[in-house]
Image (tube, rainbow, N blue to C red):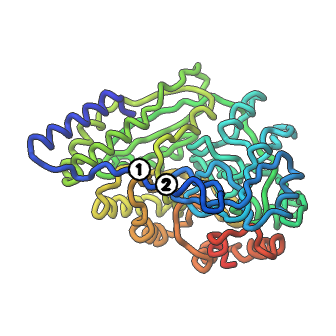
Amino acid sequence: MISRRKALLAGAAGVVVVGGGGVALAVREKPEPISPPSVDRQGRLLWRNWSGIESAYPAVRSAPSSEAEVAATLKTAPAPIRPVGAGHSFTGLAPTSGALMTLDQVAGIDRWEGDEAVVWTGTRLGALGPALAAKGRAMPNLPDINKQSLGGAIGTGTHGTGTSFKAIHGDITALRLATVAGEILECDAVHNADLFNAARVSLGGLGVITQVRLKTSANRRLHRHVWIEPLAETIARCEERWAKHRNYEFYAVPFTDLAANISHDETNLPATPPAASSDDAFLEVLKQLRNLLGFSTPLRKAAAKALLGSTKPEEAVDQGWKLLSTERPVRFNEMEFHLPPQNQMAALKEVVAAIEAHRREVFFPIELRRIAGDDAWLSPFNGGPRGSVAVHCYYKDDYRFLFDLIQPLFLAHGGRPHWGKLHNLKAPQLAKLYPDWEAFQEVRRRLDPRGRMLNPYLRELFGA
């Protein structure tokens, strides 16, 4: 969305301001966060999540190569047993002192049943796209990061954007679950329906989903359009755009009064793949503006508008799996809540106001998406559509303010947390947000009576 030349111009502009006015840097670049030791005193290797805030030294690292091995491991491995994908969750879902299990070797498309693909859940989303495309099919919608495993995305309710599209788990029509008893259970909306309703979003708390039957759609080319405009205009027109476009989302950029808009629509135009990603340069400009002009919000906004306000729109045409889900090389921590659509914009305005009043170090854009409803018991979208608001913090910056400053705003607007993103809600609060909370707990206790799948984080979350 901005060239690297403009990134350099932003730095130069900042130097002029600092040199001419004798103003000290508002925020100094912080050092890399201190990493835990790579090996603990028992010789156990460190596991760490993508952003670096969660870590563990598992006693056992398991990489089964078949569904049968998954089931056998769940029966015999030291507890807590935690499945792990790409480590893109920011919460404590994966850390364990017991067994950490990756399904990277239980991956790929097993078979086709009509237009539905039967897929092993260790498959990464970035690999599933071309595998489906080879048969002329595609996932109906995708999240914006392509590194996640299918199982991890399902278990946390991961989603894309578009008013007619459900989260990934909403397109599952059947699944297979390996349990701590060493069994493989099959379920769908009719057979073992209670298990199906519980397992589709289950945070790895019931066992390990090994295989799913997934709805697919025709592999169509999409026309991607990216543009920047005043935030007030985006807020005024976002409902119209969600209704118009196949996929639409926008990023509200604090301290700029601007928003970056992204739409995708089906097209028969020939493919014109996007140029190399400019996201890094865009974020670098925002960080420089923070570092150099963070002492003055008016100056920071004026500089941002001058540098970014006239940025030319970007266009690209390619297969959906190549455009919707991409790399995210700059690390961050994130809090995302899903709100009733009618409350989404009011919550956004309060979040932006709170950040601009109290947290001048924030420079990452705030992401807004829209997701259709589904009926999985712990789905944030259970009961109807939701609008998501996601606040990001640079991985070097303190993110703990999110719990005290931002989370109360989301809760006041009826928000439910994204299961893989930061929140500190516990069972008593969550039970009030999910009508089927106790039904889920009954299935969980039946399948895992000793809590072998529960690490300390999940014990608190479930009230176990």
| x then y, percent, for residue 462 | 67, 74
Left or right, 77 with respect to 236, comes to: right
| x then y, percent, for residue 382 | 66, 63
- For badge 2, the amino acid type reads Ser
* Residue 135 seen: yes
Q: In the rendered image, which quarter is residue 408 located in?
A: bottom left
* Residue at point 74%, 58% (across, down): 60
Report the Cα–Cα distance between label 2 and label 1: 8 Å
Q: In the rendered image, which quarter is residue 355 located in?
A: bottom left
Say the numbered circle drawn on residue 32: 1
Task: Estimate how packed mark 1 is, as few (under 14), some (14 to 19) or many (20 or more) residues with alpha carbons within 10 Å.
Answer: few
* Residue 94 seen: no
- For badge 1, the amino acid type reads Glu
Instruction: Check if mark 2's residue and mark 1's residue have beta carbons within 8 Å.
Output: yes
Label 2 secondary element: loop
Q: In this view, does 276 lie above or below 442?
A: above
| x then y, percent, for residue 222 | 59, 31
Q: In the rendered image, which quarter is residue 453 located in?
A: bottom right
Say the numbered circle drawn on residue 133: none
Q: Is residue 141 above or below residue 384?
A: above
Say the numbered circle drawn on residue 35: 2
* Residue at point 63%, 34% (across, down): 321
Task: Report the quarter where the N terminus lies.
Answer: top left
Task: Estimate how packed mark 2 is, as few (under 14), some (14 to 19) or many (20 or more) residues with alpha carbons within 10 Å.
Answer: few
Left or right, 400 with respect to 145, comes to: left
Residue 341 or residue 406, whichever sits in front:
406
